Amino acid sequence: MKRVLAFDLGASSGRGILAKLENGKLTLEEVHRFENNGVTVRGTVYWDVLYLFDQIKRGMVQAKLAGGFDCVGIDTWGVDFGLIDANGDLIGNPVHYRDARTDGIPEEVFKIIDKEAMYARTGIQILNFNTLFQLYFLAKNRSDDLKRADKMLHMPDLLNYFLTGEKKSEYTISSTGQILDPVKRTWEKELLEELGIPQDILCDMVQPGTVIGNISPEICEELGIEPVPVVAVGSHDTASAVVSVPTQEDDFVYVSCGTWSLFGTELNEPLVSSEALEASYTNEGGYGGTIRFLTNIMGLWLIQESRRTWNRQGNNFSFNDLEKAALACKPFQCFIDPDYPAFGKMGDIPKRIQEYCEKTGQYVPQTVGEIVRCIYESLALKYRHSFLNLQKITGKQFAGIHIVGGGTKDPLLCQMAANAANTVVTAGPIEATALGNIAVQYIAAGEIEDIKQARKIIADSFDVKSYQPQDATAWDKAYERFQKIL
């Protein structure tokens, strides 16, 4: 019986989770948890990747003390990367996707390559922080860094390299950056050439479930651990989360709900159409060569960053406090488009929400509860908008929505999602990303047969909760108003 160690790094925190599979059920033990905050230096927001790597090492020590582990896998957020020079050294800290350096860059790129043509070639939702736009920024403004670079590694690939010394690019994380051909599942090298970005910085690509290598002798000696294999899991956190959706259906809708809300379905082939582009749907790689056809929605970041703002002002609000305040307020007073660009930047989200409501001629929320209620209702209505678009674009009818991840701990959002979309919402598991990471490691080890068995084991091992839709008429009227601000 193998014990596997999963490191799941999100945009605000990371954790190491030790898993055991016994009698067809998984048990989890969190052995290490740590914060992950962007660091602003001279106007640029960076990831502190050396701190993150040190936390991974600390987590491996804790896992050893908790009984040991037989393999390890890492998943993180998408698009961001580090550059490695010819000596194998890191060229500076990776820049945070919320940094402003790529503001306006997509528009510059589209003067060279038509937007529709770009989407047809990559199938990726146009977001200003995509890897392609970050690389174009470097080619235009920091060309010396690219000239020094021997290889580019997305965040989980970079951490795998630190552990093993092996430079490989995992398929699912590579697919997030708008530099992959979604049909061939290979790098779109000609695209880089057209934009003056060197092609030789790209690494060989591997599929999830591939063993990258063993933990290096130096790290084993430092930490007193064994040289166990490092597995390339679904290294993009959403790819891992989708593996864990507890269903046996081939056609299902999921929301990987956390800092972001990733709303989509699983396809066998990419769907690259004008309707998909207009609706901001993306074609990212999934386990087994599948396509995660999804849209990125600004998720609980809006609550998280609002709370940080209020607490910086001298309050001490818990998330539970915010939910209670929202429930005490009158419903449907005002709405925002969660994906309005200004909401994606760090800072005073409550003030920006008030400015947005004033600009769109709506009631301007005044209290903490009113602002939080506005966020929750707007997220739920954006889910409905995405659900309807998904059915229209794919031509499929879906029986409900699976919400997985940390957002399942938020019953208000789950119930509002069911109400807004007028469909059953199944919430759980909470540790979706870590479970998908773990499942792929067990498949790689031969202890789980395939993804269907993995999903059944997860469904049998962890509780899920169903939310039935309520107040359909009121939410229908709210949606009519919501559509006018999109």
Image: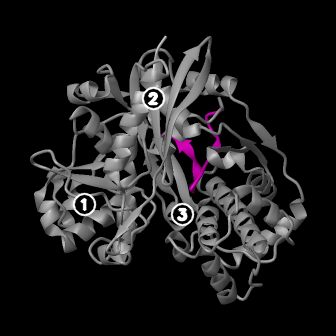
Alpha-carbon span between mark 1 and mark 2: 44 Å
Q: Position of residue 352 (x, y in %)?
A: 60, 80
Q: What element carries label 2?
A: helix
Marks 1/2 in contact by CB < 8 Å: the verdict is no
- Which of pointers 2 and 3 indicates the residue nearer the eye? 2
Alpha-carbon span between mark 1 and mark 3: 23 Å
How busy is the neighbourhood of tag 2: few (under 14 within 10 Å), some, or many (20 plus)?
some
Q: Which amino acid does label 3 sit on?
A: Glu
Q: Is mark 3 on a helix, strand or loop?
A: helix
In the rendered view, does 270 fall on the left or right side of 335? left
Front residue of 39 and 260: 39
Q: Which residue is drawn at 40% across and 41% down?
A: 55
Please tell me which of labels 2 and 3 falls first in the chain.
2
Per the image, the residue denoted by label 1 is 191
Q: Where is residue 398 in the image (x, y as percent from the top left)?
A: 70, 45
Per the image, the residue denoted by label 2 is 62
Alpha-carbon span between mark 2 and mark 3: 49 Å
Q: Where is residue 389 in the image (x, y as percent from the top left)?
A: 63, 60
Q: Is 331 rendered above or below residue 213?
A: below
Q: What residue type is labelled 1?
A: Leu
Magenta stretch: give its range.
249-268
Q: Position of residue 421 (x, y in %)?
A: 76, 56
Please tell me which of labels 1 and 2 falls first in the chain.
2
Residue 430: within the magenta?
A: no
In the rendered view, does 390 fall on the left or right side of 420? left
Report the quarter where the C terminus lies: bottom right
The numbered disc on residue 275 is 3
